Image: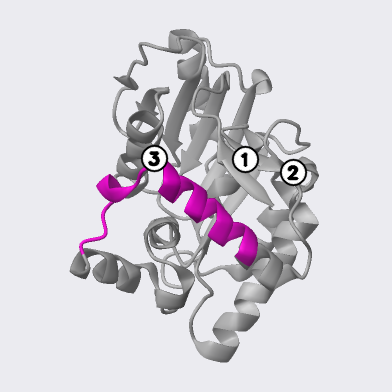
């Protein structure tokens, strides 16, 4: 399967809901404004929303990065009032209409910070499509095992040179020690991360990924989660995987030649 980039793809309004206060913002903002050229609006809890970057080339594509009420995946369910208030404000200021936006939840499966596997399992089958959900807020849950740093590792280190990690904290230490930073990411690294993700998804599920899977990602997402949990129970470490590239594929920024 051949992958290519469409870096000027018009994507309309897109929402990334994240758990952290700093790490996810800095990484996503770098990827979306430096590697690509999209307008980004950030809303960090406790602060006013700001236009982090205004694209001079595409005034119609806007990406909103919002964090949940607290840095735990449980806040997806418990913090709906908070998120509703946030999106009401973003509608008033930027005309963000969630009914006409693709929404992605970017969360870690770190056994230390997100330690409720039953809740995560339920969310995989509830948040199944970026544009059409029956849940209150809707959106697509994209997990990283054990943390978002798995994307950096997949983008910058080939699989044969990688080692598994139990927690995101250890992965961060490895990346810093080896001077592997988000600033190292270029377009070819985005494609490498996507290639590595697709290979890992197949290894864990036995099913070849197709774009149509993203129309109803629930059962597939659940099978990946269960395989990763088994991997952790068996080897005390997760297979390195970030599903973030699914969002780029879903948006058409990464093109799959099936």
Q: Position of residue 161 (x, y in %)?
A: 40, 76
**Along the line of sight, the residue nearer the viewer: 171 or 75:** 171
- Distance of mark 3 from mark 1, alpha carbons? 15 Å
Q: Which residue extends farthest bottom? A: 234
Q: Position of residue 131 (x, y in %)?
A: 70, 31
Marks 3 and 1: CB-CB under 8 Å?
no
Q: Position of residue 3 (x, y in %)?
A: 61, 45
Residue 214 drawn in magenta: no
Q: Which residues are magenta?
A: 179-199
Q: Which residue is mark 3?
A: 28
Residue at image position (78%, 48%) is: 213
Q: Quadrant of the C terminus?
A: top right
In this figure, what is the number of numbered marks? 3
231, 153: nearer the viewer: 153
Mark before the other along the chain sequence, 3 or 1: 3
Residue at 63% across, 64% down? 199
Q: Secondary structure at mark 1?
A: helix
**Labels 3 and 2 touching (C-beta < 8 A):** no
Which numbered disc, 3 or 2, marks the residue that appears first in the sequence? 3
Q: Indicate the position of residue 224 as horizontal and vertical percent values.
A: 68, 66
Which residue is the site of mark 2? 211
- Residue 229, picture quadrant: bottom right
The relative height of residue 28 versus residue 175 in the rendered view (above or below) is above
Q: Secondary structure at mark 2?
A: helix
Comes first in the chain, label 1 or label 2: 2
Tell me if residue 5 can be seen.
yes
Residue that mark 1 sits on: 249
Q: CA distance from mark 1 to mark 2?
A: 7 Å
């Amino acid at each position: 399967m051949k992958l290519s980039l469409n870096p000027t793809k018009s994507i309309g309004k897109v929402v990334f809901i994240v758990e952290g206060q700093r790490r996810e913002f800095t990484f996503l903002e770098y990827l979306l404004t430096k590697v690509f050229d999209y307008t980004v609006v950030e809303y960090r809890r406790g602060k006013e929303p700001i236009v982090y970057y205004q694209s001079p080339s595409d005034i119609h594509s806007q990406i909103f990065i919002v964090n949940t009420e607290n840095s735990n995946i449980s806040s997806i369910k418990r913090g709906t009032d908070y998120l509703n208030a946030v999106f009401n404000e973003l509608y008033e200021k930027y005309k963000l209409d969630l009914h006409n936006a693709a929404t992605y939840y970017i969360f870690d499966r770190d056994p230390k910070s997100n330690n409720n596997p039953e809740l995560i399992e339920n969310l995989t089958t509830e948040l199944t499509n970026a544009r059409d959900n029956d849940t209150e807020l809707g959106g697509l849950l994209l997990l990283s095992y054990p943390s978002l740093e798995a994307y950096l590792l997949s983008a910058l280190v080939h699989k044969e040179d990688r080692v598994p990690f139990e927690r995101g904290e250890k992965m961060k230490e490895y990346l810093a020690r080896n001077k592997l930073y988000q600033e190292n990411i270029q377009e070819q690294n985005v494609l490498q991360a996507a290639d590595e993700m697709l290979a890992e998804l197949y290894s864990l599920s036995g099913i070849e990924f197709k774009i149509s899977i993203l129309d109803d990602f629930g059962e597939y997402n659940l099978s990946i989660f269960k395989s990763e949990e088994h991997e952790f129970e068996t080897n005390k470490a997760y297979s390195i995987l970030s599903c973030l590239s699914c969002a780029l594929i879903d948006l058409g920024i990464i093109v799959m030649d099936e």
